[in-house]
Amino acid sequence: DRYDGHKLLERKQITMNDALYEQLVPRKQKTSGILISILIIVLAVAVAVLGMPLVGFLSFLIAVLILMIAFYFIFPKLNVEYEYMILNHDLQIDAIYKRKHMLSFDIQSAEIIAPKKSPRLNAFHPDKTYDFTSGNENADVYAVMISLDQKNSCVYIEPDRKMIEHMRQWMGSKMFLD
């Protein structure tokens, strides 16, 4: 089954009347991520080359071990893609590098959904902010102001037109396009 592992769908019994929509948003790689990648590779090469006269072939094995650890644990987290899945009015956000569930909430519980730069958001002062966007400065980012775990929270998402229309069906007067 294609949706194995999706907590939202495990919780709900899907019927033909339900509306399901998925969207992938790749996160732009940050400069710090590129620098970390380069430094790890330089470190591995340095260990292999400089360690060869001291410990011989063991330095090559240590360099390979450094690269394997980086490949499996560090590099995937530097290149993240977010998946938004909305089933009726339940929005689930996952980070895809090892299918890590990030957040789920009912959008009808939101106080407001509006573009990030909307003046309508000035009255809201979140205690916690979640950013599940591509990081592209020109992207159309929306803010979802919602109470999560008894904290006023702001969730930044980057929905496409189809997802916006889907959310408008459920949000009514609390959804703004400015």
Image (cartoon, rainbow, N blue to C red):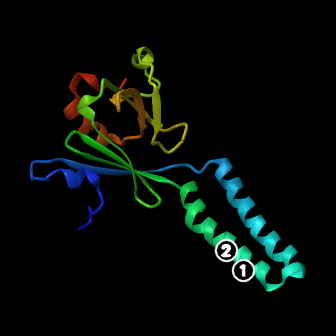
69 relative position to 20: left or right: right
Task: Tell which of 38 and 147 is nearer to you.
Answer: 147
Q: How many marks?
A: 2
Q: Which mark is residue 178?
A: none
Residue 31 drawn at (x, y percent): 67, 48
Which quarter of the figure has residue 145? top left
Residue 96 drawn at (x, y percent): 43, 57
Q: Is residue 78 above or below residue 116?
A: below
Q: Amino acid at mark 1?
A: Leu
Give the residue number, with chain letter if any, for mark 2: 65
Q: Amino acid at mark 2?
A: Leu
Q: Residue at x 29, y 26 (%)?
A: 175
Residue 101 drawn at (x, y percent): 38, 51
Task: Tell which of 142 and 160 is nearer to you.
Answer: 142
Circle 1 sits in a helix, a strand or a loop, which is it?
helix
The outermost residue toward the top is 123
Task: Tell which of 67 and 166 is nearer to you.
Answer: 67
Q: Assign the C terminus to one quadrant of the image.
A: top left
Q: Is residue 156 above or below residue 99?
A: above
Q: Assign the N terminus to one quadrant of the image.
A: bottom left
Q: Is residue 135 above or below residue 146?
A: below
Which quarter of the figure has residue 141? top left
Q: Residue at x 55, y 49 (%)?
A: 28
119 relative position to 164: left or right: right
Give the residue number, with chain letter if any, for mark 1: 61
Q: Residue at x 84, y 84 (%)?
A: 56
Marks 1,2: beta carbons within 8 A: yes
Task: Tell which of 5 and 168 is nearer to you.
Answer: 5
Residue 106 drawn at (x, y percent): 25, 36
Circle 2 sits in a helix, a strand or a loop, which is it?
helix
Q: CA distance from mark 1 to mark 2?
A: 6 Å
